Image (spheres, grey):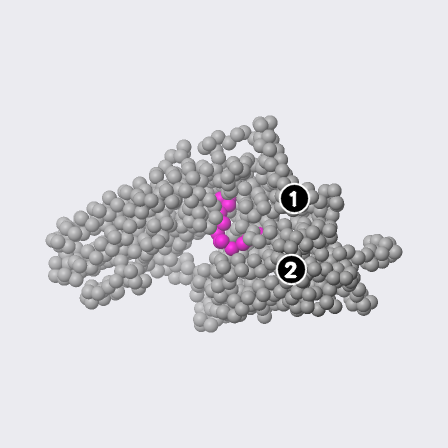
Amino acid sequence: MKKTLVSAFVLLLTAWVMFSCQKDPGSSTPDPSPSATPDRKALLTQWADSLIKPGYQRFDGKFAALKNKTTAFTTAPTTASLLEARQAWQQAYVEWQKVEMFEFGPAESVSLRNHFNIYPTDAAGIRQNISSGSYNFDLATTIPQQGFPALDYLLNGIGADNAAIVQQYAASAGHRRYLTDVVAKMDQTFGKVYAEWNGSYRDTFINNAGTDASSSLSRVINAYSLYFERYLRAGKVGIPAGTMTGTPVPEKIESYYLRGALPGQLATTAHAAVQLFFNGRSASQPSLKSYLDALGAKDSRTNQTLSGIINTQLDASYQKLNSLSPDLYAAIRSRNAEAVASYNEMQKAVRMLKVDMTSALGITVTYVDNDGD
Amino acid sequence: MLLPGGRLQRYLHTYTPAAPLATFRLAFGLLVLASVVRFWAKGWIAELYLKPKFFFSYYGFEWVKPLGPLTYGLFAVCGLCALLVALGWGYRWAAGGLFLSFTYIELMDKSTYLNHYYFVSLVALLLIVLPAGGYFSVDAHRHPARWHDRVPRWTVDALRLLLGIVYFYAGLAKLNSDWLLEAMPLRIWLPAKNDLPLVGFLFNYPWVAYAFSWFGAFYDLTVPFFLLNRLTRPYAYAAVVVFHVLTAVLFPIGMFPYVMIVAALIFFPAAAHERALQWLRRLLRLPIFAPRAPAPLVYGRATRRLLLLGLGGFFLVQMGLPFRYLLYPNELFWTEEGYRFSWRVMLMEKMGQVQFKVVDGATGQIRMVNNDDHLSILQEKMLATQPDMMVQFAHYLRDYYARQGVHCPQVYADAYVTLNGRLGKAYIDPTVDLAQEADTWRPKPWILPFDDAISGL
């Protein structure tokens, strides 16, 4: 037994030396330069420092403005302060589209999305909450009664026009309190996430650089493709356009109470954010694209790079989505076939991210033993 | 059978010490026990057999289902039988119990299929009939009449042959263009491990994936023969250890490497096994297991005939079964018709996504199915690339939605699959109502073509 172990060790060593030696004469395979080597830690660092943290920082700024303007509005409800609050809400909502996909780590553990953007909002429930004055935003039933969609109803849908809305808040302390509480809950929930990223989580994130089911890469890719599939493709277009049921339900659109240009702007902003996350801010920095290229991920049938195929598809999908602007709500009603086509185009991209890219990255999706698919 | 009559007769009457069977029994029993404990400790019993609402059964074994909370009892029985096999205590019954309980567990849900579970079942089946309980065992201690120090040589060789088949067929399966010419799937899997200490950086080089692929195929095809030969055996066994330890480090294949490392010990000569047992006797202070007067195991004529015929049949099936894929017209890796039970281990990187759509046969109303409302993550992953599971799930959905008040539910699958780095493509004909299709052994015409070729075995 001892002898066997020694021989085993010798064999391992020999194999290692063989591999190492073969490298020198093997000039046909060029030494991978640092940037051409798949380096997950560099990728995670880039994500944390150039996309996630700055993204949250920008959102934090817009959200602080929203908080100020809603406070001003509840303190002195006037048409002017309503318009300012509404504008701040729009800007924060647009900025939110750029960070909603980061639902992993701190955001996942507080269920950030549940507190921020589950729609259609439950207007009846909100009215009920306002009149009863008792509600707990940590309960699952209150998820559609808070966040940006609730603010949509509170700032845009609670009265027939601006004057009526202002009148409502001027007359009712319950309304003023509810608006304040919704913003406060968002502030508190996001505050935790933001603090963790600025604290120790950033290092935890970049140091978990493996490819198993609990690795940062695996979690990011899961969150990213889930976001694109369920919250962009289905939530913003598919469900309102009726692709799931065959019957359009345009009132399930994001920012239903304001409508106009905003729903389309939110959707295209989200789509652009997905593509930006794929390509990174600059071609010279690590990104999913450069990582896939370093892996040499190609369609072996056509020899095209996977990153190129994905970008072509994301471009096509963005174009289709953008063609539904400027009024997504109207487009879903009057040009439903085009909305369905936009959904289908996004579906193609979803599959490339979820299946082709995930496979190429070599990520494992479960902890359970697996001897080869 | 291949030997001339005289030599065959002589071979069948050759005797060998019983020690290899005893050490094999002991090591195998303990390993299976460890597997059961590990499976339990990881919480997989609940995750895989209690939580899901639906289970994918094997053709003809639809009656085998998890037993609810009693499933824990099933695993306990299995672990207990494994321990009794290791001790050689009520050996024949324990081996039977091990085979039945372990196989039942494996038949409960095919999404947990692993080649090494199949291997464990086969070995347990062999152990029922092999005379492994008569030496270095509780039985032999308690019933001196059951003690045998020598057994017919073919009883030991049966295990060697099974192990040889596992390796050799695993090697044959690697003789295909994806494995040898594209170094797939290792070219995907190795860079994902490039952060391993010492060797990780090597995995960034494609030639390393090629080296691993070619060495792996060569190893699988030849190692049984090198293990049989006295001169090459030590090196071959060292290779077994290195190879399997490497696969254990690189891939999430659980106990498989350890099972193979231990099982391959059967190739060592009886004297080595005897030494190991002596050492164990001293270590555990077990003088009671000390050898008695020599007593070879002699079978009655009828028993011997039955055993030999049974083993012959068993091995014929083992050698034929992996080739059943030849009866199917399309690419094996794509359709997976005839893929299981063939020692195809770590052969492909296949990933997919499948969206089921349920249509009301009367109103035409559409419902999209959330797979994860019904399945575990593992089941969902397996479902997405395996057509037989899609039919089974479609039938489940049909019945489920019928109970929900949908009239004559039609079930359609929109599936997309990537195989060994090829860009994914549509996998299942989305116009075929899978609720109407049956899962049989016939080719499934609704699997869309692969549009590529993988040549080889």
- Say how many tags the image has: 2
Q: Quadrant of residue B35?
A: bottom right
Badge 1 and badge 2 in a common chain: no
Q: Residue shown at 81%/68% (left/top)?
A: B300
- Label 1: few (<14), some (14–19) or many (≥20) C-alpha neighbours in 10 Å: some
Name which residue type carries label 1: Thr
- A188 or A294: which is nearer to us? A188
Name which residue type carries label 2: Leu
Q: Residue shown at 62%/35% (left/top)?
A: A14
Is residue B432 shown above or below A42? below
Residue pointed to by mark 2 = B286
Q: Position of residue A12 (x, y in %)?
A: 61, 39
- Label 2: few (<14), some (14–19) or many (≥20) C-alpha neighbours in 10 Å: few
Residue B134 shown in magenta: no
Q: Are marks 1 and 2 in contact (CB under 8 Å)?
A: no
Q: Secondary structure at mark 1?
A: helix
The residue stretch that appears in magenta: A360-371
Seen as rendered, the residue at the extreme right is B6
Instruction: Give the label on residue A4, or none.
Output: 1
**Callout 2: chain:** B
Q: Secondary structure at mark 2?
A: loop
Q: Position of residue B168 (x, y in %)?
A: 69, 49
